[in-house]
């Protein structure tokens, strides 16, 4: 009986997790509108790497890491030197996908204070991301008005994890390894990994806001 009860609980948990990441509907637009939107997103996300100071970047800093950009180009973390960064692994077909709206609101509210949100699309969890970069960019911009920097689709866990996620795990341990989409890693203005927050931590959660403000005011 006990084994049956455990089995029922596990099954229920898996069902809940699947339901929490059900597919999102995408709004539609004309080919011309789509092309214009993609170009607007591309133009808004041109980033340039900063040269390392004499003697190089501090040991353990994120600044030597550069990711490919979602629509070409690159996302050099050195471009955000002196800013706090919220790194988020994203997905377009997840029940948590509406967090994009909160992330964009957070970015708009805090960017002038020195916060940058960086999205890393990933299909590591049930393949809940589009395959093509243009589809990801269009979905994010059309449905949620996303303007914060987006890296190219990548792995965020395991042996194939991108360099920045291996870096986060090396400095924060298991807490930095995403267990699902929309996991969050906070990087300080000094380029060091500071804290990690699970998927269910909403962009406007008090604990996240407190941690971000602490970094911005440091």
Image (cartoon, grey):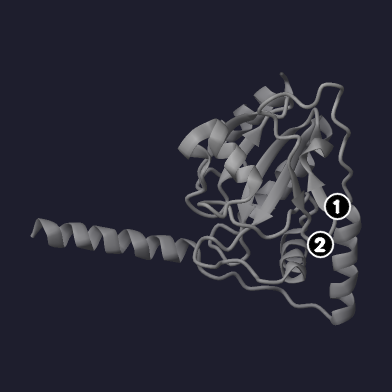
Helix, strand or loop for disc 2: loop
Which badge, 1 or 2, comes first in the chain's sequence? Answer: 1
Question: Residue farthest to the front?
Answer: 55
Task: Point out residue 208 in the picture as x, y percentages from the top left corner.
Answer: 59, 34
Q: Is residue 48 left or right of residue 108?
A: right
Q: Residue furthest top?
A: 218
Q: Residues within 10 Å of mark 1 (few under 14, many from 20)?
A: many
Residue 138 vs 41, above or below: the answer is: below
The foreground one among 73 and 134 is: 73
Mark 1, secondary structure of its residue? loop
How many labels, in total?
2
Q: Which residue is drawn at 71% across and 71% down?
A: 132
Residue, x 78% and y 49% (percent of image)? 148
> What residue would you read off at disc 2?
71
Q: Residue 167 carries which label?
A: none
Q: Taking 111 as reference, is 26 above or below it? A: below
Left-right relation of 13 to 190: left
Locate residue 155: give its quadrant. bottom right
Q: Nearer the viewer, mark 1 or mark 2?
A: 2
State if disc 2 and disc 1 touch (CB < 8 Å).
yes
Residue at horizontal 83%, vertical 38%?
79
Residue that badge 1 annotates: 45
Q: Where is residue 82 in the image (x, y as percent from the top left)?
A: 80, 27
């Amino acid at each position: 009986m006990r084994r049956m009860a455990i089995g029922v609980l596990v099954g229920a948990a898996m069902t809940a997790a699947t339901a929490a990441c059900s597919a999102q509907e995408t709004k539609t637009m004309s080919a011309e509108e789509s092309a214009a939107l993609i170009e607007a997103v591309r133009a808004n996300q041109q980033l340039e790497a900063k040269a390392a100071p004499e003697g190089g970047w501090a040991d353990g800093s994120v600044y030597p890491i550069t990711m490919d950009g979602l629509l070409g180009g690159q996302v050099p973390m050195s471009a955000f030197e002196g800013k706090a960064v919220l790194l988020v692994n994203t997905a377009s077909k997840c029940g948590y996908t509406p967090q994009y709206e909160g992330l964009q609101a957070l970015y708009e509210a805090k960017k002038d204070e020195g916060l940058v949100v960086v999205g890393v699309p990933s299909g590591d969890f049930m393949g809940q991301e589009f395959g093509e970069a243009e589809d990801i960019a269009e979905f994010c911009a059309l449905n949620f008005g996303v303007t914060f920097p987006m890296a190219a689709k990548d792995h965020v866990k395991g042996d194939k994890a991108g360099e920045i996620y291996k870096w986060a795990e090396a400095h924060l341990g298991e807490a930095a390894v995403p267990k699902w989409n929309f996991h969050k890693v906070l990087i300080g203005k000094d380029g060091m990994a500071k804290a990690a927050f699970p998927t269910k931590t909403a962009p406007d959660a008090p604990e996240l806001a407190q941690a971000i403000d602490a970094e911005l005011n440091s």
